[in-house]
Amino acid sequence: MKILKFGGSSVGDAKRINQVIDILINGYIKKNQKIAVVFSAFQGVTDKLIETGQLALQRKLIYKDELDRLRSKHEEINHQLNHGIGAGTTDEKISELFDELTEILHGVFLVKELSPRTLDYIVSFGEKLSCTIISSTLKNRKIVCEFLDASRLIKTDDNFGNARVDFRKTNRNIANHFKKHKNLQIITGFISSTENNEITTLGRGGSDYTASIFGAALNAELIEIWTDVNGIMTADPRKVKRAFSLNSVTYEEAMELSHFGAKVIYPPTMLPALQKKIKIVIKNTFNPSFKGTYILEKEVSKNFTVKGISSIDDISIVRVQGGGMIGVTGFAGRLFNVFGRLGINIILITQASSEHSICLAIPPKQGDAARKAIEEEFRLEIFDGKVGEVKVEDNLSIIAVVGEKMRHTPGVAGAVFNSLGKNKINIIAIAQGSSELNISLVINKNDLSRSLNILHNALLKK
């Protein structure tokens, strides 16, 4: 069996959905291939649902206008895809879903409360609507299929907004369902539920994760992620003109590239597939003849030591230094606890071997909050002069040079630093993991585009 997943850009309107249906019919169904297909909400719908919820929370009546526009969008797509009785029957299902959504939003408006639990419930309608319309369209075209609400099968904790999957229960549920249902399953991405059947979500990009969860539970031969680009590229083509598609990468390389800004695949997606050693391929809905980029356990190609250059465009550096830090047990632990209490994600860490200074890269909007919290935590050390002024530096970017074979190849780091040095690019901070899979550099944001192109030219000549 193969698990296919189509993202929001692949189902942005009726024309694109027809393209997807053609891919399914001509590429799989006519060839009698056994597949199950995961779909995201239509393009832009999840964001609009979040926005509508926030408007209702703020008691702005225009939330009703946004809701009407969402209803009209889905009805219009349905009528463009289907005609006559088929469209009318699906209209009834769409209407039922929007009537329920209207009641929920009215409740938010009245009580002025939008909890993570309620928001998960609201955004779950995106996938329910898209899969309702697509499954009905396939049936109207004589394709035998069933709508499958994944929240019935994928069980999680109650961490609403980014729930953790209970794989033991989930795998059992999926296996049992597919034993009883042999027809093509059209599966809602992104959504799941607790043991009490409260709707949860798997985090943004969670439809990829859904595909991987189903693939692993069913021991699929392949998981296909269909998106709007030609697989995984060596760099962002909007920033690097010479970027090109890769034939294959390892799971670890894909995770590193995804973490540092590559938007092709949601990082947790690889974990269930990696555990079962299931291959993933990234394909392009708008160029279905492109063979795709394969994500594998081991990559045998000898073409490139470096596989990709990724970036996080906007970060801040928090720098703490002082003689009182040297040899003091627990200093770093206290520092990390500060960030943990504030819920701040640390993207990169560097510390001098002298232990005199430590700097951490974080999202830019959280710089001031981090500085104030650190000053409060270490107020006595600062008063005694053991810790100096806590500094926050903004307008920075991170570049990550990624490649599994870098660990066995001398001179890669030298080539990175030499190429940037010759072009007078200042490196503010450097971090390299012990796996040698990734060299990360902090630079001025204004130098990002030029640095990416310099490194790509130096390290990835086709």
Image (spheres, rainbow, N blue to C red):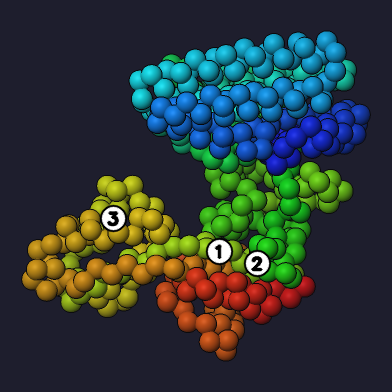
Q: Which residue is mark 3?
A: 369
Can residue 201 be seen from the camera position used here?
no
Residue 376 drawn at (x, y percent): 16, 57
* Residue at the (64%, 56%) spot, across then down: 250
Tell me the distance, in whole angstroms, between the alpha carbons under discs 1 and 3. Answer: 24 Å
Q: Tell me if 62 is positioned left or right of 322 in this view.
A: right
Determine contact: label 1, label 2, CB under 8 Å: yes
Tell me the distance, in whole angstroms, between the alpha carbons under discs 1 and 2. Answer: 10 Å
In the depicted structure, whether residue 171 falls above or below residue 246: above
In the depicted structure, whether residue 314 falls above or below residue 69: below
Q: Which residue is mark 1?
A: 311
Q: Secondary structure at mark 3?
A: helix
Q: Nearer the viewer, mark 1 or mark 2?
A: 2
Residue 429 drawn at (x, y percent): 42, 74
Crowdedness near tag 3: few (<14), some (14–19) or many (≥20) residues, C-alpha within 10 Å: few
Residue 75 drawn at (x, y percent): 72, 22
344 or 30, nearer to the observer: 344
376 or 81, nearer to the observer: 81
In what quadrant of the picture does the N terminus appear?
top right
Q: Secondary structure at mark 2?
A: loop
Q: Which residue is mark 2?
A: 239
Tell me the distance, in whole angstroms, between the alpha carbons under discs 2 and 3. Answer: 31 Å
Which amino acid is tagged 2?
Answer: Lys
Which amino acid is tagged 3?
Answer: Ala
Disc assigned to residue 22:
none
User: Could you tell me how many numbered marks the image carries?
Assistant: 3
